[in-house]
Amino acid sequence: MEPVKTLRSRTVVLAASHIDTDQIIPARFLTTTTRAGLGRQLFTDWRYGPDGAPRPDFALNRPEAAGCAILVAGRNFGCGSSREHAPWALVDYGFRAVVSTEIADIFRSNALKNGLLPVVVDEATGRWLIEHPGVEVTVDVETTTLTLPSGARARFPLEPFARYCLLNGVDELGFLLVQLPRIEAYERRKTAVS
Amino acid sequence: MRTMFQKIWERHEVVAETADTPAVLYVDLHLIHEVTSPQAFAELAARGLPVRRTDRTLGTLDHSTPTRTEQVFGGAPIAIESAARQVRALEANSAAFGVELLGLRSAQRGIVHVIGPELGLTQPGTTIVCGDSHTSTHGAFGALAFGIGTTEVGHVLATQCLLQRRPRTLGIEVSGRLAAGVTAKDLILAIIGRIGVAGGTGHVIEYHGETIRALDMDERMTVCNMSIEAGARAGMIAPDETTYAYLRRRARAPQGADWERSLEAWRELPTDPGARFDREVAFDASPVEPMITYGTNPGMAIPISGRVPARGDDPVLARALAYMGLEGGEPLRDRPVNVVFLGSCTNSRLSDLRGAARVLRGRKLARGVRMLVVPGSQQVKAAAEAEGLHRIFLEAGAEWRESGCSMCIGMNGDTVARGEYSVSTSNRNFEWRQGAGSRTLLASPLTAAACAVRGRITDPRELL
Ligand code: SF4
């Protein structure tokens, strides 16, 4: 995995709360056996009308959204299914961070494994960002802060190991494989008692 | 004094967590299915890694698998080509990596969360994971069971372990007797309505109290199944005599002397008296009525005789009502329905089918209503047929299918048409969940069957 240290981008805003994984990537696109190319189907049912034409009023379809790498969303983003296709689709589309006042557990865990930053901010910051789409903000993994255009900074929580993995491009499977002798010892202990 | 969660967690820590690193948590049972596993197997193949414990891994086909008999048994091709590819991919990966797969024609195949308990693999005190959020279902047996993403599926395949931070605990004490015609599904919808769809985020829920003790295993599974709809990764219920009676003599449960030894260990699991949860909620079940959802998340539920909340200035509610084609303040009762779906890992077990059959016996579906009955597993299907339930469904005019996820997620071609109202016993009423523009109202099997008979939203107590 590539290290992720800082990210500077304009934001695109989806103000709705409880945006679930079925909205991020509908189930009918999960009949895939690879992780590539899912960005095309990101938010499909909101992005396109029944005739397949892009809806001009949808935030991602506006010209100013082009190239934005930070998605700001209402609370409880990513609730629902454990499908990792949701972060895959967001990353494939070009997003590198999701900012909300609350992000669902499994989505957050899946996002971190794909270099997509789940940034949970306080209510005031969240509200301000939703009311000011398109502003340029900076997300810094080292200091776990999000910096607004005014220079004001908001801290966000980031599990220390996830932060370490992001900063150093560490792959978790590699870390686990190093633990194999301890895993084997655990298994021997367990069969001995049961 | 420790909670059940704590006991199970501590017993499965290969390496305890520190400030800098999460715990290395051992996984006793890893269930896999066709949708969230192919990319994980590809990762193993790319790194030249084997599946470390094939004896702790079991695969099934459910999510994108057809439920039409001719496509399962009759040699007809699977209608959706990408779904067929997924089925073939799991068959090929299982063979290549030596993992047992309950294949398309296996008599033990079924929805991943139905077959684990049914085979006796879901046991108290174990850790169980699957690339599916409703893995919380297995917690009904006093297991720590939760959904994971595909990268983590790869971690477990390769190492039988996961890197995890210890979640907090939420105790929900339920007291009071459930009224006649009110089911475990109504109870959990009422609980989610109360604590909210993010009320359990970061927590493992333990349901306890007299009402929970009185539930049978199928009902406990329905409750734990929907823990994720309250944002919790896992839900648990302490094992007791009901649990042991269910598991005894199941094909893959411990047998003989092993059974006795296991039983002794299981009796140590329940939360010690006086142990504290990080948060506690008390819930009175006695006023709960048959529940139904009106919106686009499972927390948007009301008693079936109630009114949809007034729109006010809540943008989430306004959006949900617009999608559902409903007005704030109106009653749901007597609104026409188009489709009824009886199935999913929430409500597709034998007792669910019996409940619906009780309502449908000797009755017909209302004109224009389509009803799909999809048993949770091939074993449930066989058991239902042995007692003649399928005849009740067929004579009423419903379709009787092979097992699978079906219309719960609409991946296999079983879908609800745009704008149609579907009363569904599944667990998610998200926009488009059951098909393009589908409108889902979640309810119990009794309510679903009553709506099928009347063709309108109906209180099941009128037909019992
Ligand atoms: S029945 Fe529905 S909720 Fe259950 S595992 Fe299948 S798709 Fe998921």
Image: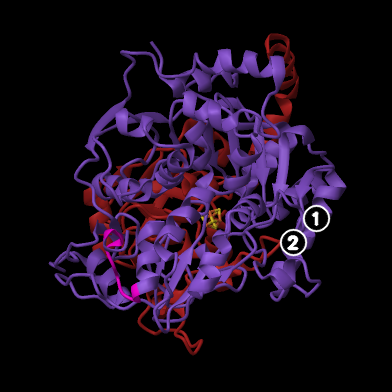
The chain that appears purple in the image is: B
Quarter of the rendered image showing ligand 1: bottom right
Image height of B11 relative to B291, above or below: above
Tell me the magenta residue range.
B454-461
Amino acid bearing label 2 = Val
- CB-based contact (under 8 Å), mark 2 and mark 1: yes
- Asked whether B290 falls inside the magenta stretch, the response is no
Which residue is located at x 37 percent, y 50 percent? B185
| Host chain of mark 2 | B
Residue A11 falls in which quadrant of the image?
bottom left
Which residue is located at x 30 percent, y 43 percent? B199
Asked whether mark 1 lies closer than 8 Å to ligand 1, one says no
Image height of B198 relative to A25, above or below: above
- The residue nearer to you, when weighing B202 against B272, is B272
Outermost residue to the front: B362
Which residue is located at x 31 percent, y 25 percent? B278
Image quadrant occupied by the C terminus of chain B: bottom left
Task: Specify whether A191 is left or right of A44.
Answer: right
Image height of B413 relative to A137, above or below: below
Can residue B269 be seen by looking at this rendering? yes
Please give the label number shown on residue B91: 1
The residue tagged 2 is B87
Image height of B334 relative to B182, above or below: below
Amino acid bearing label 1 = Glu
Give the colour of chain A.
red
Asked whether mark 2 lies closer than 8 Å to ligand 1, one says no
- Residue B44, position in %: x, y? 78, 45
